[in-house]
Amino acid sequence: IEAHAVQFGLGSVEPEDAAVLEAIAGQIRELDSIARAQEHAVLIDIVGSTDDRGNVAANTRLAELRASRVVAMLTTLGVGQATLEARGSDPIAPRDTSEASRAELRRVALSVELVRRP
């Protein structure tokens, strides 16, 4: 599942990115259906990130806010909230100090894990 195009303002998902998140929600729902048939569960770890400019505590909170916004949107789009876990990462230093490099760090990453149901 990839969402390279989703952009963030100050903790919000831009309206034009709704189609990207709708596609991701559809993929998660499909994967969940397949996993259930195989007696597995899908867990999605959603991690928000920021660059290292500014206050560390504020950036960490912003990273958490980004992840929680994605969880809220995916839940609205029919993904079970029990499947989703949101967290923020500590600010990340860019490879170089260019704005493009910093912009790559302002993101949310989704990791998918399948676990066997007891």
Image (cartoon, helix red, strand yellow):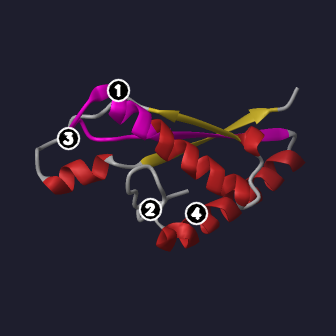
Residue 83 is situated, as x and y percent measured from the top left of the image, at 73, 41
Q: Nearer the viewer, mark 3 or mark 1?
A: 1
User: Which span of residues is magenta-colored?
Assistant: 40-63
Q: Which residue is mark 1?
A: 57
Q: Which residue is mark 3?
A: 94
Residue 33 is situated, as x and y percent measured from the top left of the image, at 82, 54
Name the disc covering residue 21, or none. 4
Q: Which residue is mark 2?
A: 6
Residue 117 is situated, as x and y percent measured from the top left of the image, at 85, 31
CA–CA distance in space, label 1 to label 4? 27 Å
N-terminal label among 3 and 1:
1
CA–CA distance in space, label 2 to label 1? 24 Å
Element type where label 3 sits in the image: loop
Q: Is residue 104 left or right of residue 36?
A: left
CA–CA distance in space, label 2 to label 3? 19 Å
CA–CA distance in space, label 4 to label 2? 8 Å
